């Protein structure tokens, strides 16, 4: 029993000794750090240590980019204009079609009967007009009766043209050159006016749809060139032409913009793919730039400290664009001025400073 008690005592003493050594090391390190700080203060003779940056004048050229999706320049949702039963469908999904090509046929028996009836009415109206005109020459009818006969003939002709037009609409023909992306009908299906029949797209010409900020809109115009990168073809670079800029921003305060692809060799780029448009802003002759960290508080304060005769002097400036970690200065600074970039929290007008290199 005594032996166990002695062992516990030895272990406790060892733990206390180890803890004491650790505390002693921390105290020694803290003492060294305090001594270093004291030495710095002594060297600076009570001045506030700061870092500075020399104001530079540089030429600016900034690229803007925006992401979006490719869409066809022409896309058509083809719908039926008549009611009836589909008798023939002549194309499948993926089929290439040309303008005027027959795609499908709707049964037109009733419409043909309407054409025959309108044709008969037209012939009868024409005969009546001729009889009234002959009778008018001999005084058998009045001018008013002749005019009514002519009006009846005109109405009959219009009804005949309308009936023929409805028959022609039963032959569904493509109005663009493109590809059948989707087919919504099968032979035997009954359709009504407005029923969607096909979705046709023309991928020979594509455009990239993006949304850009007001800063980009202010730098570009319709007809400008833009570089285009396609995410699935990172080793290829395409070019495009800005074909549309929205006159009004959307709910997110961005402006819809479209860039038409100039060329699409082998039609590798397809509608729906993801792309990035890169706009090159015109280079500005010169601009004064300072680090963003030079501002007192934030860029919106438009205040910086400059070094003047080894003291801090508060300067009111006018900030321009924020370019990453640098800010354009429109007014208040000159090239060669030294702005303070750290330690501003300890400064006021006239505070003595020492520059840390």
Image (tube, rainbow, N blue to C red):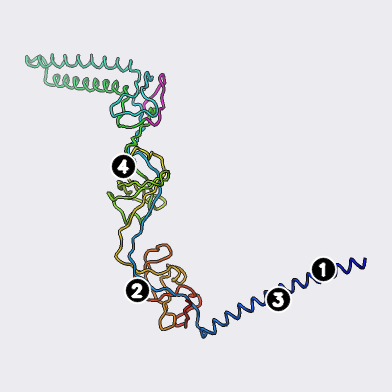
| Local SS, label 3 | helix
Picture quadrant where residue 155 is located: top left
Q: Is residue 29 above or below residue 285?
A: below
In 3D space, how far apart are the residues under numbered discs 1 and 4 (Cα atoms)?
82 Å
Give the label on residue 335, or none.
Answer: 2
In 3D space, how far apart are the residues under numbered discs 1 and 2 (Cα atoms)?
69 Å
Residue located at (7% from left, 15% from top): 139
> Mark 2 or mark 3: which comes first in sequence?
3
Picture quadrant where residue 287 is located: bottom left
Of the two numbered discs 2 and 3 in the rendering, the one whose residue sits closer to the viewer: 3
Of the two numbered discs 4 and 2 in the rendering, the one whose residue sits closer to the viewer: 4
Disc 1 target residue:
11
Disc 4 target residue:
263
In 3D space, how far apart are the residues under numbered discs 4 and 2 (Cα atoms)?
46 Å
Mark 3 is surrounded, within 10 Å at the Cα level, by few (under 14), some (14 to 19) or many (20 or more) other residues, namely: few
Give the label on residue 24, or none.
Answer: 3
């Amino acid at each position: 029993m005594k032996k166990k008690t002695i062992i516990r005592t030895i272990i406790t003493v060892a733990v206390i000794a180890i803890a004491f050594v650790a505390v002693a090391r921390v105290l020694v390190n803290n003492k060294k750090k305090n001594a270093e700080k004291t030495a710095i203060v002594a060297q600076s003779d009570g001045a506030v240590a700061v870092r500075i940056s020399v104001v530079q004048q540089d030429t600016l050229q900034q690229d803007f980019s925006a992401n979006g999706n490719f869409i066809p320049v022409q896309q058509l949702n083809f719908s039926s204009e008549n009611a009836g039963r589909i008798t023939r469908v002549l194309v499948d999904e993926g089929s290439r079609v040309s303008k005027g090509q027959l795609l499908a046929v709707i049964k037109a028996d009733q419409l043909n009967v309407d054409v025959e009836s309108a044709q008969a009415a037209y012939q009868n109206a024409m005969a009546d007009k001729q009889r009234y005109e002959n009778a008018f020459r001999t005084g058998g009818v009045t001018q008013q009766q002749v005019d009514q006969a002519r009006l009846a003939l005109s109405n009959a002709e219009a009804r005949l043209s309308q009936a023929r037009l409805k028959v022609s609409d039963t032959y569904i023909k493509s109005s663009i050159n493109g590809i059948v992306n989707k087919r919504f009908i099968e032979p035997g299906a009954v359709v009504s006016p407005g029923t969607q029949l096909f979705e046709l797209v023309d991928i020979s010409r594509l455009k990239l749809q993006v949304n850009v900020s007001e800063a980009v809109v202010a730098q570009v115009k319709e007809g400008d060139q833009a570089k285009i990168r396609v995410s699935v073809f990172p080793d290829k670079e395409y070019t495009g032409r800005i074909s549309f800029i929205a006159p009004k921003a959307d709910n997110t305060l961005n402006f819809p913009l479209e860039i038409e692809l100039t060329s699409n060799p082998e039609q590798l780029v397809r509608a729906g793919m993801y792309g990035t448009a890169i706009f090159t802003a015109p280079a500005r002759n010169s601009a004064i730039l300072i680090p963003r960290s030079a501002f007192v508080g934030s860029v919106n304060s438009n205040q910086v400290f400059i070094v003047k005769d080894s003291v801090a002097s508060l300067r009111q400036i006018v900030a321009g664009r924020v370019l990453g970690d640098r800010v354009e200065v429109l007014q208040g600074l000159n090239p060669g001025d030294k702005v303070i970039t750290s330690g501003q929290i300890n400064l006021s007008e006239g505070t003595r400073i020492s520059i840390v290199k």
